[in-house]
Amino acid sequence: MNLIINSSDAIGDANGTIRIALTQKNLADSPGVMDTFGSIIAPGAYVRLEVADSGCGMEEETRNRIFEPFFTTKFTGRGLGMSAIRGIVTSHDARLQCSSTPGVGTMFTISFPVPDPLEEIVMAPEQVMSYQQTGGTVLLVDDEEILRSMGESLLEALGFSAIVAQHGAEALELYRSHGSEIDIVLLDLIMPVMGGIETYHELRRVAPLLPIIICSGYDEVSLEEAIIDDPCAGFVHKPYNPKELQSLIIRMMRDCGTPTSGIR
């Protein structure tokens, strides 16, 4: 969605074309091929998504900055769309390439790795966590109803109980009345009324050891200054990787303990 919106903006009021293609590609062994972020594109099977436009294109200086959080060339933009793309690409272990020529257009190519269907995946015993090993109550805070519903179902499937809130202000009220029951908070970054960072600071002010996980499709670098020195704060990418999320919740509850006092 973000790639297509950007392509549309690049074309503007002029006539133009946006081309979207999804193809299978088997990359041969060609060492040294890197994506836009400097990651090696390993040989193997990929599904490739291409979004190309005949818009205004970009100079190299702009192209080198488009994935920086809050960088934008639009008057009305927030500069978070491309950062979200990077987060999504990273969460799928995919590779992104960008080519652009001023006055000609831009093309983004995202290569999603395809696992070998014959490859047997063997999990180490410590990676297998039963419902009996989990447990606890998660306060899930997200402004999108469908994501709250899906997140609640996922947490329950992983063995946790869930309490949901649609923004930070509601989360603080819930913690005020149910603080002794809440073991950890899963907190969306961008929300109306009260966003994730503000909510994090308000919760931390009254609950120094409350485990808080900030979740977002945006890149983690934009959160480093807020949580870097907090051992009871973590980050997880959206869309959630169930095993990664389960492991992080359990580790943070274990390391930070369970808070027993709510907001006064």
Image (cartoon, rainbow, N blue to C red):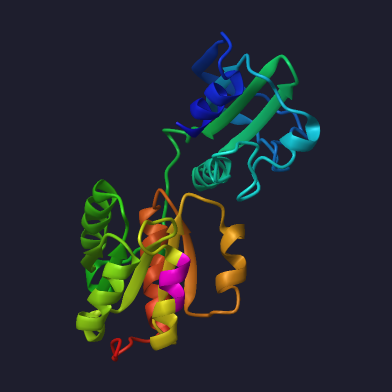
Q: Nearer the viewer, residue 254 or 149?
A: 149
Q: Which quadrant of the structure image shows residue 100? A: top right
Q: How many marks?
A: 0
Residue 203 included in the magenta stretch of the image: no
Q: Quadrant of residue 168?
A: bottom left
Q: Is residue 121 above or below residue 252?
A: above
Residue lying at 43% horizontally and 51% vertically, measured from the top left:
238
**Left of 9 or right of it: where is 194?**
left
* In the image, residue 4 above or below residue 178: above
**Residue drawn at 66 percent across, 40 percent down:** 66
- Image location of residue 121, percent across then percent down: 42, 47
Residue 45 versus residue 188 in the image, above or below: above
Q: Residue at x 40, y 48 (%)?
A: 239
Seen in the image, is 210 located left or right of residue 58? left
The spot of residue 92 in percent (x, y) is: 49, 43
Residue 25 quadrant: top right
Q: Furthest residue to the top?
A: 15
**Which quadrant is home to the C terminus?**
bottom left
Q: Position of residue 58 (x, y in %)?
A: 72, 27
Where is residue 139 drawn, in percent x and y? Answer: 28, 70
* Of 116 and 206, the residue lying toward us: 206
Q: Which residues are magenta?
A: 197-201
